[in-house]
Amino acid sequence: MKISQRLPSPLIRRCNPYCFGNEKVHKPYENHHQSTFLTCLSRYVRSLKDVKSIIKYAKLDERNLTQVTQVALYYPSESVVSDNLKLLELDEHMLQQISLGQNLYFKGGLTEKVVLCTDEKTYDVKGAEISNSLLLVPELKFGAATSASPLKSPRNAANTSLERSLNDSTEDDLTLDRSLEQKQISKTFHEYLECREIRPRFRKLGDLLLLTRYSGPENEEFIDRKFLFTFQQLQDTIQCSRKQFMEGLQKYRAIELQGHMRILESEYEYRIINLMVGLINENSWVIDEVEKEETINALMGIAPQEIVKGLFEIYTIPTMGKDERYTYKEDLVARIVAQFILQPGLKFRVDEFLSSWQEALPDGMKCEEKYLHGLGIFDKEGSIAFICSLNEENLPLNIHERMRLLFKTKSKWTLDEIEPYIEYFTTGVLSASTLMAKYARSLMEGGTRYYVAKH
């Protein structure tokens, strides 16, 4: 579902009514310069005499009111399907997108909470009640448009003051020309949709792509074709903006193969990447002078060309100042190598792991602990430091279950250590430290703050 550009009709807050005779009369705005009365009628149309009586009983000075009185009527109209009208709260970004003619999209499956997406951001959507009712009145006039005479003291070319230059007469019997205009109320709102920016929900993207992991042409006969998805099918399904969706494809290193988006089985991906970076030493290339065409041609017959091209685009960046030359991204190459070494269920001594990791990297690349964020954890509590595999992508999506598993795996964490594993739950206003304050206890040891299980 999408929201196209459409200028909103005025929304008028209905004031609490007070009684006049046997009918309810709505007190005008605190700014008494505008005589816009919103009266919900279902049997008759308010007359000019009624309006003047209301002004009198409300103890208002008619000279302080503009000449046009708008009477709001509510009659169900066949041309307006009010059930399809919703009041949506917009922030500056969403308002700018609509002003530029862009679309907003609601996304969500039958078992998912709905989200609202622009081309760049994703928002959680919840219904919220309004203390007073809001009326949707198309073509409602505002202050300056209801005055037939010039306005005093304009601030600029556009009159912004509601003060009238009618006259300064103090006569009580001053006769004023007043006109009535009927305005149709399209809908009365008692709630609105409240939006809160959230992180993109990529996990479903990974789950869908895992169903058809590519491990070589010889295994394609075992793939269930009904679980293959095109780029557009995934974009329409995943709860994130288009920009974030592209980032998600990069995160999972997805490649388009024969019209469908695929990810590679980890060992197969490592094998192809190992062959690709091995060409650096084989061809005596400088680390930042990798040749694309030579790499693709060298792996012809070993892996499909679409796979090699896709991996090359993901793992390299163009080298500045050197045409047609590329540099491998050190962090991605280091992570795929570390993931291959860190097999689940195994524990390694840190010094031995770092040595094996560095030897597996091509000359010119360095292994750094930051490349292991969300992939492996260090245990330095004993006399010998160890490292083991802990992949964030495999952890539960429920915050309580994830915390329970994290503290079962490791009894105490620093904020830097645990942040990659709880980043999924953070937002623009909810930081990792705030999450830890809520779901864990903190303690100081040797000047370092650690977090432990709350219970």
Image (cartoon, rainbow, N blue to C red):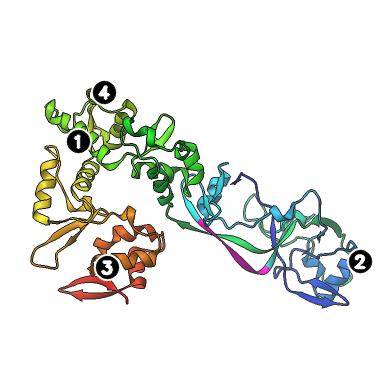
75 with respect to 339 (left or right) = right
Query: Which class describes the residues within 10 Å of circle 1: few (<14), some (14-19), or many (20+)?
Result: some
Residue at x 34% of width, y 37% of height: 214
Q: Nearer the viewer, mark 1 or mark 3?
A: 3
Please tell me which of labels 2 and 3 falls first in the chain: 2
Q: Are marks 4 and 1 in contact (CB under 8 Å)?
A: no
List the residue tagged with mark 1: 274
Work out whether residue 138 or residue 203 is closer to the camera in this orientation and state it.
203
Provide residue 246's location: percent of width, then percent of height: 41, 41
Tag count in the figure?
4
User: Which of the two labelled residues, at mark 4 and mark 1, occupies the earlier sequence position?
Assistant: 1
Please report whichever mark, 2 or 1, sits nearer to the chain's N-terminal start.
2
Query: Which amino acid lies under the numbered mark 2 shown in the image of this protein?
Result: Lys
Q: Are marks 2 and 4 in contact (CB under 8 Å)?
A: no
Residue 10 position within the rendered picture, expressed as x and y whole percent measured from the top left: 69, 56
Q: Which mark is residue 49?
A: 2
Q: Along the line of sight, which residue is nearer the eye, 81 or 98? A: 81
**Label 3 secondary element:** helix
Alpha carbon distance from label 2 to label 3: 78 Å
| Location of the C terminus (image quadrant) | bottom left
Q: Earlier in the sequence, mark 2 or mark 4?
A: 2
